[in-house]
Image (cartoon, rainbow, N blue to C red):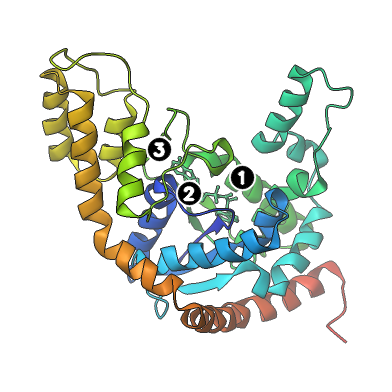
Amino acid sequence: KTRVLTGITTTGIPHLGNYAGAIRPAIQSSQDDNTESFFFLADYHALIKCHEPDVVRESARSVAATWLASGLDPDRVTFYRQSDIREITELTWILTTITAKGLMNRAHAYKAAVQENVEQNAADPDKGVEMGLFCYPVLMTADILMFNGQKIPVGKDQIQHIEMARDVAQRFNYMYGETFSLPEAVVDDSAMIIPGLDGRKMSKSYGNTIPLFEAEKKFRKLINKIKTNSLEPGEPKDPEGCSLFAIYSAFTGEAEQAEMRQKYADGIGWGDMKKFLFEFLNEELREKREEYTRLMNDPAELDRILAKGADKARAVATPFLEDIRNKVGISPMA
Ligand code: TYM
């Protein structure tokens, strides 16, 4: 069976981009009998950006509830919290010792932080950069390799990290003998990069997100806030580069998109388009939102599901880590 693995960082509330870019394709692939899926909450990744314990805790619950409300079947999928599997952080260290610093220098998130410092003429280009941010791709590599993940459904922004994981896996295999499968990113082309309120990539770090299960009223308000150009109703419009169209496309197929292109050509007004998009998404998400709300009010159920998932994950990780320790010359656990 093919091992499918993916995670979501537990900072903030999952948004439309996380859903269309990662959650939905992952759940779809988990329904295929030829796959074995590992989906998890990347809560140690969250600590890189967020040092508020309550936010970290709340967000882990919200991400868990989102996966489940979106249709994840915990009997089918191994669904767990990264932090519950201590083997992952142990493997992180082992992999850190064989990861080239130069490779990490090239990671987008780190480079962006340095670039910002340079632009602001900071004396130290590494100003404000913690080792967590710098080593982030190694932790992610351990997430993947711990379970020999082969297909990694992610949004476009994560492709580089999967390629790094592949490099590190190759290096380990070369040094210590065949151990890890080489992971591959799976990017859902139809979703690509979902734009946020301001037209840039929807991202928690830009503060431009539309939470997936936002309450109806607020959801409508947010859709109305999506930036458009200043063309008037009746003027023909270009769907390419339009955020409203991009979001609609992530939730529909070819036929609906063709119909929408025609409406753009016929000059649909932005107000009407936003109303249409809100009503469409609201219908699409209604049932899932109700389930999400129910789960958020039942933390005991979430904990129970995650504890079972952690047991399943450990059953794979514990013996595999023993094998890895042995390969690098660390004695069995005393
Ligand atoms: P994170 O939490 O930033 O995002 C989770 C997933 O959502 C995708 N995504 C998007 N897709 C389309 N459009 C967008 N606007 C958009 N925003 C986010 C991301 O590509 C991602 O797939 N480091 C990862 C989490 C992680 C992970 C892993 C993933 C940790 N370990 C191992 C795969 C395998 C992250 O921060 O994703």
Rendering coords of residue 246 (x, y %): 31, 33
Q: Is mark 2 within 8 Å of ligand 1?
A: yes
Q: Of the residues tagged 1 and 3, which is closer to the observer?
A: 3
180 vs 322, left or right, is: left
The residue that disc 1 covers is 161
Residue receiving disc 2: 154
Residue tagged 3: 194
- Name the spot of residue 282 as percent of width and height, x first: 24, 51
In the image, the residue with mark 1 has its CB under 8 Å from the nearest atom of ligand 1: yes
Cα gap from disc 2 to disc 1, whole angstroms:
10 Å
- The answer to whether 66 is drawn above or below residue 22 in the figure is below
Residues at marks 1 and 3 touching, judged by CB atoms closer than 8 Å: no
Q: At label 2, which amino acid type do we have?
A: Val
Mark-to-mark CA distance, 1 and 3:
19 Å
Counting residues from the N terminus, which is met first, the one under dot 1 or under dot 3? 1
Who is closer to the viewer here, 246 or 95?
246
